[in-house]
Image (spheres, rainbow, N blue to C red):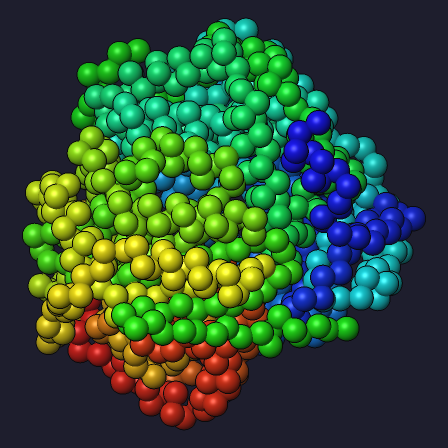
Amino acid sequence: MSKVHSKISDENRIGKIRSSTFDNGFRVYVREKRDAPLVSVQAWVKTGSIHEGKYLGCGLSHFLEHMMFKGTKKYPGQSIAETIHNSGGEINAYTSYGATVYHIDVNSEFGGMAMDILSDILINPLFPEDKFMDEKNVILRERDMYLDNPGRFISEKLNLEMFRVHPIRHPIIGYREKIESVNREIMEEYYKKRYLPGRSFFVISGDIDADMAIEELREKFGKQPIGDLNEQFIPEEPEQTCHVSSEYTFKDPLARLAIGFHSPCASGPDVPALDIIASIMGQNKSSRLIRKLKDEKHLAININSFNYTPYFCGLFAVNATCSPDKARELEDSIYSEFEKLKEDGISEKELEKELTMQTTDYIRNLRCNNAMARLIGNTVLSYGSPNYADKYLEDMAKVTPEDILEAANRYFSKDSSSVVRLLPEESAGKQKSVKNKSSVEKKPDMEKLPGGQRIIVFKENSLPLADICIALPGGVIFENENNAGISRLASAMLSAGTKKYSEKELSELLDANAIELSISGGNNSVVLKANCRKDKFSLTVSILKSILTESLFPQKEFSREQHNVIESLKSRRCNPQNAAEDRMCEMLYGKHPYSHPSAGNEKSVASLSAKDVKDFYMKTCLFPEMSVFGIAGDIEAKEAVAEIKSLIDCIPWNTASKPGMPSKPVFPAKPITEKYKLPREQSVIIKGFPACNILSDDRFASDIVQAAVNGMASKLFKSVRENEGLAYYTGLYSSRGFHEGFLAFYAGTHPDTVNEVDKLLDKERKRLARKGLSEAEFNAAKASLYFGISEQMQNPSLLIFNSVLSEFYGNGYLMPWQNKDIYKNISLQPFNRILGKYMDSSSVITVIAGP
């Protein structure tokens, strides 16, 4: 028995789940979790795209999901979105091959309301005729956007190659021609046939009384008729007996590969072993495909693997992105790695590492209600019982190296695999074939060291996890046109090898101990984040010490990262959303560093050397007075602080000079509109204008207007999406830092409707400039922000991250705990005056990216 098995077999970490099955087959599962005043309510229906029968390919399940939000008997029109919006909660849904899920996250006082809304959605949808065509047009645009995304495109083609009979071969959203054939009668027929009590269940996790929830749902669903018990026939996929390959072209400079092997359904006895193999091959920094083919051989820019095992049939796949000239060698190398696995298997040490990672990921999932409810729902869907989540971990812990070897040889034959190649058009021809508020009330402490560094400590012991967050000066604002992207490269190089650890050794050490580490360079900072089990805290600090004090910035790894960034930037230019935003920032900020993305540009990145990057890190990032360290979780504060101080003492700080800031940006004096041509089916519009910096009190107004303008109940969404059906998505977002940021409206639409959508976006901007928000919009936006704050309070990792960044910027480490009171004290009239100041801008930059 493994060490991990001994830890999990005696402890049901998922907690007690109350369940009840009504006479008609409807089921309810409730997990009480009272550490924060929040609840997640989810309605699951066991129907997805594979169940559409004679309408297969129409995307009925997905279409139905869209229409279920268009009103019910009790909540007609926009009442659903408005009710949730006014409560500050969030509602959404998703459709998979085998299920449709509707979910609401709210403060627990609105838990009854959430159950009522989801119940009425399932029982009494109206399917308003006047909304049907609008929603069909929205879905058709969504379908076009799928075809504009190379990752989705190749995944769709892989399913088509691998599955010749099973309906999983067809996309969930359907095909354009088939979607166009759907009418209201077809959709209503499908609803009546599939949305029945025996196929439906609720999952609730959070601050709620289980008995009360079950009885409320019994009142709503207990007397529903059982309905038709005949189940849709799903053909069984025959065994694949030969290698299948196909090749497509795409207007993108990078090549992509998707390799698929058949795997069993969720209940198959080999699933735990295959999940471990997926992790070993391509889910972590030390995984074989990532380490060997990306980091060592430089064949892949990105590569990953996954084992998708729903309750019907499975798919084990490898996805990779690379330069076109390396595609064939990369493909051969992927197959070679699986052959090595089949011959050599894995060691006990490697297996122990994977089991540690899996169980730690499981614990991390317990932090929030939404993730827990989804875990329970998937377990019920696949195994019929919520208890299998813990049993699955026990089964995984029993896996031996011999089981891995046996599974590898059973499933990973090239002769029964499929490969899809997606190549750039220009290079295709060159290729060969009762509430407990204690968590809310806890606050951190901070100590400022003589050198200027600050340490924030937040003790929270609900789970045996610890977090470390470090913010250092760096990012776009400290760059110039000649070294743009240097912070991003520095972030990548910090984990590329140190005096103590090679890149490979570091990756293996992190994975073996289930330590999550991320290092990122943004607009205003370089941030290191680590999450670990509490007994690995000292080891994690030791690893960070090596990274921060003795990184080598080795030439081989630098050349690899430099190449990957340049290739990714080429691909970024082909993405309508990214291209539009990048061009908008160029025109808005001119010569200011905020004019370029954090990845830089191809010319500047190509000009950098490993020495340039190391010098930048040493001189800019290691300035003590701007550095903030945070620790949170199940820690002993005194000992933890001592370890962080020891780390700080070892860092070669630059005390000679403070990193220089550029002059503030000078914005254009008048509006500018530009069209950016791209070979895509859809267009993206971005309309940006100057906003406040991170230190301005106006930032709170910016948060409020974003909460008001985004979401299905917003006036913008209604005018652009609901009333006119002109865009699949639309909203408002912001960016801010040490210098003035921006606010930007955006929308994804068809090329024929860009002018109409552009006018509607500008109409909304002018409405907000002249009239501001109504009282109802204002109150709903604040409620949404309150909910977001409550969600944050249940996640120590997010809290310490925001606390560290707030202190780093100069707003104080307690800001995450003060935000709610600040929002409460903002009244409508002063808010609208602030809003008008920014919305009535003469520096509006509009970029339309598309065909």
Number of numbered tags placed on the structure image: 0
In the picture, residue 397 is in which quadrant? top right
- For this orientation, the residue located farthest to the right is 23
The quarter of the rendered structure image containing the N terminus is top right
Which residue occupies the foreground of this view, 749 or 794?
A: 794
Q: Is residue 42 left or right of residue 533?
A: right
Q: Is residue 845 left or right of residue 328?
A: left
Residue appearing at x 43%, y 29% in the figure: 287
Whether residue 409 is visible here, answered yes or no, is yes
Q: Position of residue 198 (x, y in %)?
A: 81, 43
Residue appearing at x 30%, y 50% in the figure: 548
Q: Is residue 391 above or below residue 523?
A: above
Q: Is residue 434 above or below residue 566?
A: below
Q: Is residue 370 above or below residue 492?
A: below
Which residue occupies the foreground of this view, 184 or 683?
A: 683
Q: Is residue 158 left or right of residue 528?
A: right
Q: Position of residue 315 (x, y in %)?
A: 55, 25
Q: Is residue 450 left or right of residue 723?
A: left
Whether residue 730 is visible here, answered yes or no, is no
Residue appearing at x 25%, y 21% in the figure: 326
In the picture, residue 289 is in which quadrant? top left
Which residue occupies the foreground of this view, 591 or 851?
A: 591
The quarter of the rendered structure image containing the C terminus is top left
Q: Position of residue 307 (x, y in %)?
A: 55, 29
Q: Is residue 462 above or below residue 713?
A: above
Residue appearing at x 56%, y 62% in the figure: 636
Q: Position of residue 540 (x, y in %)?
A: 45, 48
Which residue occupies the foreground of this view, 802 or 640?
A: 640
